[in-house]
Image (cartoon, rainbow, N blue to C red):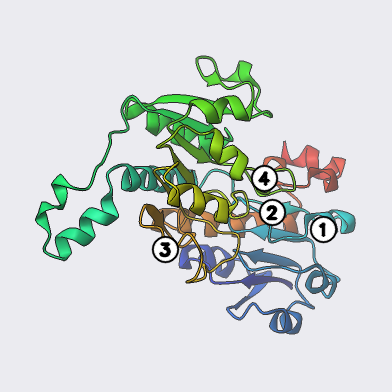
Amino acid sequence: MKKILCIQPLHPEALRLLDARADVTYEVVTDFSRENLLKHVSDANAITVRDALLPADVLDAAPGLRIVSRHGVGYDNIPVEYCTGRGIPVTVVGDVNSNSVAEHTLFLMLAVARSGIQLDAAVRAGDFSARAKIPCFELRGRRLLVIGYGRIGQEVAARARAFGMDVLVFDPFAKQANFPGVAFANTLDEGLASANIVTLHVPLAPETRNLIGARELALMPAGAVLINSARGGIVDEAALAESIRNGHLRGAGIDTFAVEPLSADSPLASEKNVVLSPHSAALSTEALIGMGVMAVRNALAGLDGNLDPALVVNRSVLNDEVSNASK
């Protein structure tokens, strides 16, 4: 009997897939402290994990582990190099949460552009005259710089074009020939200097940590807006707060933070022109179902030997037999 350890809850539709497998048992753990994980991981053949930190020493305690299945698309909470060294595939869920994140990104843009939080607070306080005092602007005609043109970046760009925005893309890894009609910036600096709104859609990696710092923020035009629904750590939060405080940037919409949950004394928390959400861009009901189901499917595929290579982060671990069987 193979065991799947589900670190953090999965949607009931995902669990039904596991219930249908007579050859698989599973355990859901909601206490994902290192100490508790060590108590439950020893007999795990597969792991599903949401955003809990998965230390290498926890995985080291699972000698029969064959697959780590991420409930999402980011994987900075998983020790991928360690997994690769053990020949353990790490999988992600593909595009099932792209729509949710793209819609949330547009929500953040609109909330900042239309001063949504301030206007809501004013009406609740009985100040209807706020409509004449609190400025807002339209998205139409504004230039949007999309940094990272993967699945989510493309979805955001499509929605932005529907609003009449001028979309510019920066992604040094994208094959521009595959995107006819899409305007690409030659450099990040070039893109930042011409954008009214900048939205981030890149993973957190050594090369993207603090990708947007004080220098990059200063390159953006006065009154510009920054949106981050990708990963905390990509933006220097103190520098962002200072840029808004000194009036250079108009505001920001931030869903992910370097340290989560966000501390009450974070410089971002005190800025009225910053719209915050609790790393929830991918958590629509539809996306939770899709991510849970795909995370379970990937875990089962890893046990059954029929992984989809397109969903494997560390593809070098796939041997020829698995690769051929997945084609």
Q: Is residue 77 above or below residue 129?
A: below
| Mark 4 to mark 3 CA distance (whole Å) | 39 Å
Residue farthest to the front, as pictured: 246
Q: Which mark is residue 270?
A: 3
Residue 258 or 172: which is nearer the viewer? 258
Q: What residue is pinned by disc 1?
A: 83
**Any part of residue 276 in sight:** yes
Secondary structure at numbered mark 1: helix
Find the distance from the CA under tag 2 to the CA under tag 4.
11 Å
| Local crowd size for mark 4, using a 10 Å CA cut-off: few (<14), some (14–19), many (≥20) | some
Q: Dot 3, crowdedness within 10 Å: few (<14), some or many (≥20)?
A: few
State the residue at coordinates (63%, 70%): 6
* Mark 3: amino acid: Ser
Tag count:
4
Look at label 4 and name its amino acid: Leu
Given residues 55 and 139, the one toward you in this image is 139
Q: CA distance from mark 3 to mark 2?
A: 46 Å
Q: Residue at x 67, y 28 (%)?
A: 172
